[in-house]
Image (cartoon, rainbow, N blue to C red):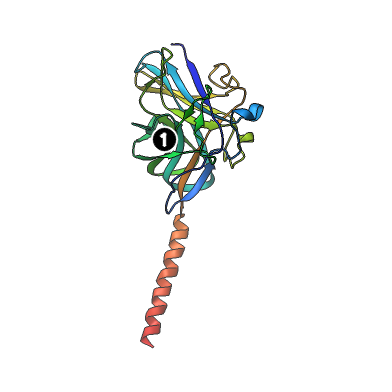
Amino acid sequence: MKKFLVFLMIAGLLTVGGGIASADLLVDRGLPTSNLNNSAGSSRSNVAWADWETTNPPSEYWLPGDDVVLTDPGTYHIDTIRVWSIKNDTGFSLLAGSDVNHASIFSTYTSTKVTYTDASDYQGSSGTPLQIYQLDFAINETVTSGKYYFFLDGPWIDNRDGGFVNPFLHASNAALSGSTQDGSDDYFQWLHIKNGAIVGIESWLSTGGGTTGWGAGWDKNSDANVQVYGARVPEPATMLLLSSGLIGLAGFRRKFKKV
């Protein structure tokens, strides 16, 4: 089956709506903050990727995604993964995990409409304004440090060009983003699905190459924009030390009351 990639060029600055309560920002590769609308020319950074296929649903396709790296050794509890999509926000799910062959599917999420700071919407390659959606997926998963993969799934929609596309996932060129881009490596990841089974991950350079062998889709390389919220899980020794301190404190308080 012939594989096609389609993309949308974006415009402007983004204001992120909503917030994540009681969780730390573990990985910050958020949306660009520079003015990168179509008038930016060669400085344009932002893009949105989706797979284009001729049938709905296709028997073979690719989910757009990427990886993040939890750098400090140890265990983490991931609470929320935030990504951004374009045009649609209905019926999405996020396939995520340290091992994609045993990854979980997360389908509980909140969607927030966002605009650029100048109140403009996403500007596609045709110049048409398109809605930007911030998607906050509830994860509630404990993982060890290292790579953690995520891929956006959802309904295929008519692209009005004789084909269908799955959800567009927002990405940007790290060097031009103007914002923190944790773990960016210029590679975008695709999850290869065939007859309902995972074939594997294919790394792709937007300028052509990577493990896919696909040609160029853009004049810059890109990483998917993502923010991961959660917390480090204390090591057992730390918990033991903390517990011992609390027990000692309780004993001290009891002795104080007896005097």
- Labels in figure, total: 1
Q: In this view of the protein, which residue sits in the foreground, 43 or 23?
A: 43
**Residue, far right:** 42
What residue type is disc 1 on? Answer: Ala
Q: Quadrant of residue 255?
A: bottom left
Above or below, comparing residue 133 to residue 232 in the picture: above
Say which residue label 1 marks: 96
Question: Image point 40% across, 70% down: which residue?
Answer: 247
> What residue is at 43 percent from the left and 46 percent from the top?
18
In the rendered image, residue 237, in percent from the top left (x then y), is placed at: 47, 58
In the figure, is residue 155 to the left or right of 217?
left
Q: Quadrant of the N terminus?
A: top left
Q: Front-most of 107 and 149?
A: 107
Name the spot of residue 223 as percent of width and height, x first. 55, 32
Left/right of residue 1 with respect to residue 179 in the rendered view: left
Q: Is residue 157 left or right of residue 213?
A: left
Q: Quadrant of the C terminus?
A: bottom left
Q: Residues within 10 Å of mark 1 (few under 14, many from 20)?
A: many
Q: Residue 69 at what x, y percent from top left?
A: 53, 39
Quarter-of-image position of residue 162: top left
**Residue 62 x, y percent position in the rendering:** 44, 22
**SS state under label 1:** strand
Residue at the image position 45 percent from the left and 40 percent from the top: 82
Q: Which residue is most to the bottom? A: 259
Which quadrant of the structure image shows residue 102? Answer: top left
In the depicted structure, whether residue 161 falls above or below residue 139: above
Is 247 left or right of 127, judged from the image as shown? Answer: left
Check the image and report above or below for 216 versus 9: above
